[in-house]
Amino acid sequence: MSETWNPTTAGVLRLPSGRLVRGRGLRHPLPPGPPPGFALYLLGREPEPVDWEYRWLRWPDFRLPSDRPATAAALREAWRRAESERVEIACGGGLGRTGTALAALAVLDGVPPGEAVAYVREHYARRAVETPWQRRYVTRFS
C-alpha cells in the first residue's frame, strides 16, 4: 500500500496493532483521499456497486447480522487485510452497525471484549454501537 489513510482524520480507527480501518456512513459523501482496497458494507439490502473489492453482509439497521458465522469470517478477513490494505467498514449512518463491526475488529486485535465498545467510542465515534444487543454481540464476539 503506497498511500495510507491518516489516522487523525475523522472516521479512521487505529487499532492497538497499528492497523487502520476507515468507518463511514454510506449516506454521506465519499471522504477525500485514496479509496479502500477492500470494504465490508453492512446493510439490509445490497449496495450499489463500487470500483473496489467489497463484500455485502445483510445486517438490518439497529439489528444484528443475519448470518453471524459469515459475518465473523468477513470481519476476520477485514482485520487480516487491514495489516497491508486500506479497509473500509460502512453502514447507512456509520455508527451502529459500523461501530459494532469496528468493536469486533478491536476484539480480534486484542482489546478485551468488555472494553471494545469503549475503545471504539473513544477512538472512532462517541455514539458508536447504538443498541444493547449490538453491545452484547461485541462482548460475545471471539
Image (spheres, rainbow, N blue to C red):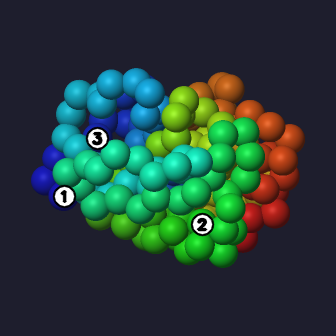
Task: In this rendered view, identify the residue nearer to me: 98 or 109.
Answer: 98
Q: Residue at x 29, y 41 (%)?
A: 5
Q: CA distance from mark 3 to mark 1?
A: 10 Å
Q: What amino acid type should be assigned to the residue bearing mark 2?
A: Thr
Determine which quarter of the picture holds residue 118.
top right
Q: Nearer the viewer, mark 2 or mark 3?
A: 2
Identify residue type, mark 1: Met
Label 3 SS = loop
User: Compared with residue 130, is residue 47 higher up or lower down, i.e. above or below?
Assistant: below
Q: Residues within 10 Å of mark 1 (few under 14, many from 20)?
A: few
Residue 137 screen position, x and y as percent: 78, 56
Graded by Cα atoms within 10 Å as few (under 14), some (14 to 19) or many (20 or more), the crowding at tag 2 reads many
Left or right placement of residue 99 versus residue 41 in this view? right
Q: Residue at x 44, y 27 (%)?
A: 27
Query: Which residue corresponds to mark 3?
Result: 5
N-term-proximal mark, 2 vs 3: 3
> Label 3: how many residues lie within 10 Å, few (<14), some (14-19) or many (20+)?
some
Task: Examine the rendering and report whether any part of residue 72 can be seen.
Answer: no
The N terminus lies in which quarter of the figure? bottom left
The part of the image, by quadrant, that contains residue 119 is top right
Task: Judge left or right: residue 68 versus residue 11.
Answer: right
Q: Which numbered circle lies on residue 92?
A: none
Disc 2 target residue: 71
Task: Give x and y (percent) for residue 15.
Answer: 51, 50
Amino acid on which disc 3 is placed: Trp
Residue 81 visible in the picture:
yes
Q: Is there a contact, CB below 8 Å, between mark 1 and mark 2?
A: no
Residues at marks 3 and 1 touching, judged by CB atoms closer than 8 Å: no
Find residue 1 and name its label.
Answer: 1
Q: Alpha-carbon distance for marks 2 and 3?
A: 24 Å
